[in-house]
Amino acid sequence: MFKLISINQSAFIKGRQIVDGILIANEITNFAKKKGLNLMMFKVDFEKAFDSVNWGFFNLNHEWCDWIYRCISSASVSILVNGSPSDEFSMSRGLRQGDPLSPFLFLIVGEALQVLTLEACEKGLYKGIKLASSNRNLSLIQYADDALFFGKWSKRNVSNLLKMLNCFKEVSGLKINFSKSRIFGIGIRQDEVSKVASIFNCQADSLPFIYLGLPVGNNMNKSSAWEAVIEKFNRRLNLWKARTLSIGGRTTLIKSVLTSLPLNLEGIRRRFFWGFNETKKGIYWVAWKKIMARKEDGGLNIQSLKFMNLALLAKWHWRFLDNGEALWKEVILEIYGSDPLTRPIHMGSSAWNAILEVNDTIEKMGVGLQSAFHKSIANGSLSTFWDVKVTAAGPKIRDMFPRLFAQETNKDVPFKDRWILRESSWIGKWEWRSVIRGKTLTELRDLEKLLENMNLKESGEDSWSWKMDSQGVFTVNKLSKLLHKRIAPPEICDFANFWNPLVPLKVSLFTWPAVVTLTSVDCCLCGLEPEDIDHCCFRCSKIDALWRKVWGWCDMSEPRTDSLSSFKIRILHGDFQRVRSVTIRAVLMITVWLIWWWRNRILHSPQEERGKLQQEDLFPVVQRMANLWITNRKPTLKGIWQHWSSFPSDLD
């Protein structure tokens, strides 16, 4: 498929991504604005794209058609009528959405539109947009059935585009839904755009517009450009009211749902996490930076939206080096020149400027990006020798050794003709204009030393590697984790043993803020003295009696824990036997959680009921809840209650 489908199609092909078309559309829009071009953009909406393709359009022989038919006709479907399914029946035509074969069959159909458009451009019937001095006539980009045409604004172009689409509809069966299609003009008055829209019987629209879910033609440096994203973010949160979820549920939701919008909206997430809503304000118990830190550093491992965004932007640097002949890469090269990653920032579109700026931002944080991209040269490489860079951020060989470059007889000589593998050794094969001596000879020695230390391969093709990863492969996840290591404050460390799989998340999250920060609370248990968190959870006479029972139950001979500091040490560094340590830690965390639950129950009960609640024995509750939560999470611990009630680790 990679060889069959043109680079203008970015769907379902390895190495191509949905964001490619979005970047191309933004770059062309910015280019047309800066050059003062009159440009037409037509966003096509296909009607029932996967269902209306003519099978005969593929022009395949009977055997191929039979294979494909067997694949897509084997399924049966039923229709919901008033909520009740009808009898099942077999498929007889159409490309079923969701069938693994359907996308690839549709790409072949879409390729026909690409070929038709290219032929029209070659015959001068349709004029796309030419970038810089290139001969490329860019006229159409596609992502599956999402097609976006570019063209010179002229009556002839408009007329011929309409004819092309009608011709394509007749031969392929794909109908254009003109009522949902949109036309845009750059450098054109809106009333002129409306006139052309009436010819197409489509909607006249203006910049910015949404293409593949993201804005095109907007200045993303303006805060107003992000209003739609913020509204979407808030709308997503409104579906999950903070008051209906526990803190564990809110943590899970933030991780799984809200991080899918990698923008700097930490304030919304922070308020949601602490339970803010329209009528209630929560309390910030722990700094948000501590919350975002990795679990082993004392945080909750909630992805930083800023760092995720940086990592996603950084991926463009890696893809530029590693993406071969991608269309988006060729567009960038044609607009910004041969070395666009090192061009001055603020000379391009807002999207490309953001991609360029991310390198300096990440490097300042102590994580290598371009400086960590190293090139590996293969034996027989066709790369131009003097244009090779050792690292993506470094200079070309010609700039490192200008005297030698001046003496070179062939400025465009391939690498394979200058640095040669012979009998397992690499040697230079130089051709100079004159005899090398003095400073030029010193440069030659330095050049040979540099080449000897380069990553050279005896076979294969030239490639890039990222030294921040042991496998040499750049990934967004890896970079995001490296950036996350910079979040944790120095005092938070060694939390590897804290997060316990045997207790509910809400129990861990209750104990967690007490461990990472000491917070004063009001007391209502004994009423004998003002309370801080140590008194409430450990030193109160009623709580101390409970802990004595827990220590005895767990056969703990160590000194009693009477403060958060000592509790923290015991939870993180307890010297319990390795086999039973997880269970014992779980019991301790559940005990603290139940103390707080008991305290809140007393505090919020009517005055006449408090005395009775204060006389309750919490220890049996600790035993029952510990047994329930731990055995549900580790069924192998289930056994006779008498064993558990006498010693919680007998069953480990």
Image (cartoon, rainbow, N blue to C red):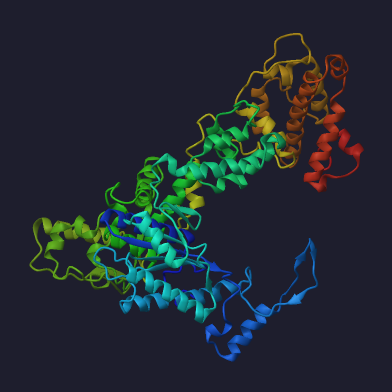
Residue 445 or 10: which is nearer the viewer? 10
Q: Is residue 75 left or right of residue 648?
A: left
Foreground pick, 23 / 227: 227
Q: Residue furthest left?
A: 434
Give the left or right position of residue 245, taking residue 322 as reference.
right
The structure residue drawn at horizontal position 67% and vertical position 16%, both measured from the top left corner, is 532
Classify residue 79 by image quadrant. Answer: bottom right
Count up the numbered dots.
0
**Residue 493 falls in which quadrant of the image?**
top right
Q: Is residue 361 left or right of residue 545?
A: left
Q: Position of residue 361 (x, y in %)?
A: 38, 42
Q: Residue at x 60, y 25 (%)?
A: 517
Residue 310 position (above or below residue 89): above
Residue 480 in view here: yes
* Quarter the C terminus occupies: top right
**Percent x, y of residue 237:** 62, 41
* Residue 72 shown left or right of residue 79 in the figure: left
Furthest residue to the bottom?
Answer: 62
Residue 115 position (above or below residue 351): below
Q: Where does residue 4 sit, x and y in percent of width and height?
A: 46, 78
Residue 394 in sight from this viewpoint: no
Where is residue 248? Give x, y as percent.
Answer: 68, 38
Nearer-the-camera pick, 261 or 291: 261
